[in-house]
Image (cartoon, grey):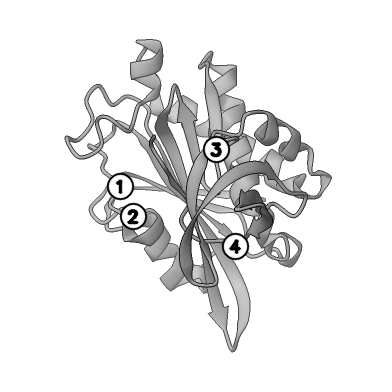
Amino acid sequence: MSKYIHIREIDSTSTYLKCNYKDYDNFTFLSCDYQSDGHGRNNKKWFSNKKENLLFSILIKDEKVINNYASLSLVSAKAIIDILVEIGINNISYKWPNDVYVNDKKISGVLLEGVSFNGIIEAIIIGVGINVNSSEMDIEIKDKATSIYLESNKLFDIEILKNKFYKSFESNIENINDKKYLSYLRNNNYLLNRKVYVLKDGKKVVAKVIDINDDNSLKVNTEGEILDVYSGEVTIIND
């Protein structure tokens, strides 16, 4: 059974769960009104004003789900997309491995962090940020980010929306093995046919995105060679 916890302010919901995971059950959701040290991949800052957006982390301790680590970013993205579709947001796409875009701008991000003990992963923290009622974006990201409000011109009740997202995450993660999420993400792949930089043998190379593989890796073509990318930053090349 899931457990829901909400606090007003914290440095980071994910950091807190990482440090205290032994004290909480599987499928514990921790949300907040504001976090002072929210972060995404490569410690990039996640900006959010108080009570404007959805900021939460999910503690996963179920061994079967942990063993599907490679699927969790994609499943999480699909859980977010399902609710965006439900509330009438259009032009949604998935940017591998962990972002959701609307009209070419980022509306949500997911960050997975594993917690290991003696070399064994005991828990995974899924950190989630969803821009909901932001009317203005920080100057550093205003050309790259959007919100549900900016896309719909409607303000949403954060609590009602949060419960919708929680249920969507529970449903999608519980059905992680059915791979149904892959079809939608492939058909709405933001990177498809784009030129990107990826790492090959430790070096940055130019590649063209072809597909998302069954094992959730990104398939690219680099100088006539098919390469499967399993992790790392994928940077779009703007012509």
User: Is 233 displayed left or right of 119 in the figure?
Assistant: left
Residues at marks 1 and 3 touching, judged by CB atoms closer than 8 Å: no
Q: Which mark is residue 46?
A: 1
Structural distance between the alpha carbons of marks 2 and 3: 23 Å
Q: Nearer the viewer, residue 167 or 146?
A: 146
Which residue is denoted by mark 2 in the rendering? Answer: 39
Q: Which mark is residue 25?
A: 4
Q: Nearer the viewer, residue 112 or 10?
A: 112
Pair 2/3: label in front: 3
Instruction: Give the SS element for disc 2.
Output: loop
Structural distance between the alpha carbons of marks 4 and 1: 26 Å
Structural distance between the alpha carbons of marks 2 and 4: 24 Å
User: Is 51 displayed left or right of 167 in the figure?
Assistant: left
Q: Name the residue at 56% across, 78% down.
A: 116
Q: Nearer the viewer, residue 149 or 192?
A: 192
Residue type (three-letter) at the residue carrying disc 4: Asp
Question: Which numbered disc, 2 or 3, marks the residue that appears first in the sequence?
Answer: 2
Q: Which mark is residue 191?
A: 3
Residue type (three-letter) at the residue carrying disc 2: His
Structural distance between the alpha carbons of marks 1 and 3: 22 Å
User: Residue placed farthest to the front in the image?
Assistant: 223
Residues at marks 2 and 1 touching, judged by CB atoms closer than 8 Å: yes
Q: Name the residue at 69% across, 35% down.
A: 186
User: Residue placed farthest to the top in the image?
Assistant: 153
Q: Could you tell me residue 22's position as x and y percent?
A: 53, 73
